[in-house]
Structures are given as structure tokens and as C-alpha cells.
Amino acid sequence: MTIPLPITNDAGEPVLARRTLLKGAAAVAATGMTISAAGATSVAPFGQTGAPTISTTPLPLGPLPGSRYPDAHLESAKKGPPTFGPSGFPAFAGTMAVERVATGFRWAEGPVYFAAGRYLLFSDIPNNRIMRFSEDDGHLSVYRQPSMNSNGNTIDREGRLITCEHSGRRVTRTELDGSITVIADKFNGKRLNSPNDAVVTADGAIWFTDPVYGIGGFYEGIKAAPEQEKKNVYRVDPKSGDVKVVVDDFVEPNGLTISPDEKKLYICDTGFTDGPDNPSHIRVFDLDVAAGKVSNSKVFAEMPKPGITDGVRCDTEGRVWCSVGWGDPNEDGVRCYTPSGELLGKIHVPETVANLCFGGQQRNRLYICGSTSLYAVYTSVQGAMKP
């Protein structure tokens, strides 16, 4: 057995005595505090902290009040003799109704569905968090907070989460091990505005929009001056990581999606938020995925002002589904168009709708982000987005 010998100081007191330790600890603490104070910097919090919206209305979870089969919240644009369900509108799936499946948010946005886990991720932008809705049992939880005031989310062909961040002013990828990779945060050496929405093509390229909504104040991000001269649509090369402008003539580019054959690119312009003479519509482009270019821009569908659409998805037949809100309450919800731009019908939701995506294991359940709540409805079609 080894017995340690006491080490004494000049006064004969063991150095490891309690009094000596306390003196030393105080000195070290003081030194540490001085160093810490000298090197500290003040960092602003990323947007609002979590403050869920407490529902005070009689609107419950489950099918919307007054729902019966066929659900009157589905409105066909084709009028004619009575039919079983809304005529010609593929939102009808028989014994179904528009459901309110979760609530308690301030501005729900950017939904994306992960089939492997049967869950939906979506942003609650002002509350600075990404939420997770588990489809199997309806459980709601926080996936990430802070989320850098995330807005649009999508999934790449390897099953990884792609996120547009307001506070970070960047596009990120969440790797399969949970680490986060910055995909794009600058163009020509200057910071991006506030990436809004993204889509991934089969070659792995990431296309995203960059309006200024996330830097306009402190509610959905951090107020700052834009560094980019224009509000562009960008493409990130899957091999080199180079960021290039593909469209530069939008007032406020917002939601975007691609057709199932990847020959068309749809982009919402919500410039009406900046002035009454600005556009509120969806534009469509011919898409050349291999060349990383678009051409032949034209207006696909006009929105009823003062409403706007800032979320859009396609089904497997090329029909275009888009959100509607901010205008006439009777227009709040979802619109569906043929590939040629003909309005097929509407899904009426009792809140302003921001975005939407197809989910469910058959990709036939349409999830709708409507202001403070998440809605869902089964359709008779399948979403086109992969995986």
C-alpha cells in the first residue's frame, strides 16, 4: 500500500488543505471571469423563441365542423349535373374529409414527408423550430429548436433533409448522422437574402428561391439589409457545389416545384406583398436538368388578389396543387390546376394557407400548413415528389 506524503508550503500548512483550495479556486475563477469577459461577444437570438399559439376557438382536431361525405370543403370548378363527389376534381377520395391534425403554431410552413419513418416535418417560423408530426399515432413533437427560423424543407434523393433558413440566410443539409452541412450561404462573396424554398432534381442539384422576407424584421428572422442586388432563383451544382443564378427577374420568388418528368419548373411570385401592381401568380419554365438551365417563362396561373400563393406541388399526372391565402377568406385553402393551367377545383380551409405537400405511404395524403394548424386530406392522386 502506498501512502502519499503531504506537500507543505512555507508555513507548514498542507497545500491541499481546504482553505488553500478555496483561495486557489477563487483566484482561478476570477481570472477565468476576466478572460471570459474580455473575449465575450454579444450575439442576438435567432428570431422569436418558442411561444405556441393557444387555441381559443371552438375549432377542434379531427374533421372540420360540418363535414359529411362527400365533404363540402371540396369544390369542383366544373359545374354540371349532380355526381358522386365533386365532378372532375381529384381531391375526392370517397369516405374522407379535411382534417385538422395538429395546432399550436404561429406560422406553419415548409412541409416535407419522410416515408421511412412515417412522419412529416414542417417549420413554425416565428417560433424558430421544426415540428414533427408522426402519422402512425398522431404524435406531435419538436424536431429541432432553434431552427434558424427555417422556412422551406425538402428531401434529396438520398433521404436527407434540405432546409432553407431565414436567420442563417443559408441552405443546409442534415446528414444521415445528424450533422449539418451548409450547402449555400453566399453568392459572389455576399450573403444570401433569406432562402425560402427548395427542390432537388434527379441529378442531385438543389434549386432554391431567395426573397427578402426573412430579413425584413425580427419576427421570422433577423432584420438586416439585403446584400444581393436582386431576389434570385439559384441552382447548386451537385458535384462542384457552385451556386449560380438561374432566374433573376422575380419580384419575390417563393415556393417552387418540378413536374414529374422534370421538364417543367414552377415558381410562385408573391411580389404583391411589396405593392399592389406587383404579381401574384405562378410562373412555369421549360427545365433542362442536364444543362442546369430554364427557358421560355410564362405565367401559369394568376391568383385572386389580394391573395397570394407561396407553396406548390405536382401529382404524378402533372397537375399543379398550390396554396392560397392572405386575401378573401372564401379563397383560403388549396387550388388544383391541370398541366395546361385549367382550374380543376379548390379545397377550402378555415385559415390562410402557406404551403403543402403529399405524404402517406401511398403519397396520396395532402398535408396543408394553414397558419396556426396542420391539416390533412386524402386524395385520389399521388404526389410526384421523390423519394
Image (cartoon, grey):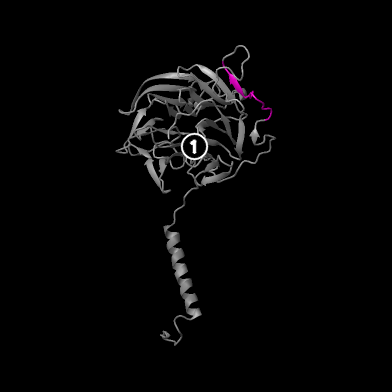
Q: Is residue 157 above or below residue 334?
A: below
Magenta segment's dominant SS is: loop
- In the image, what residue type sits under mark 1? Tyr
Residue 327 in the figure: left or right of residue 283:
right
Q: Which residues are magenta?
A: 65-77
The x, y position of residue 351, in whole percent, is 61, 30
Q: Residues within 10 Å of mark 1 (few under 14, many from 20)?
A: many
Q: Say which residue label 1 marks.
A: 113
Q: Nearer the viewer, residue 268 or 218?
A: 268
Q: Is residue 338 visible?
A: yes
**Quadrant, the C terminus:** top left
- The image quadrant that residue 232 belongs to is top left
Residue 75 magenta-highlighted: yes
Q: Nearer the viewer, residue 73 or 256?
A: 73
Q: Is residue 178 above or below residue 338?
A: below
Residue 232 in the figure: left or right of residue 145:
left
Q: Nearer the viewer, residue 287 or 272?
A: 287
**Quadrant, the N terminus:** bottom left
Toward the bottom, the furthest residue is: 12
The x, y position of residue 254, in whole percent, is 46, 30
Q: Residue at x 46, y 74 (%)?
A: 24
The x, y position of residue 299, in whole percent, is 44, 19
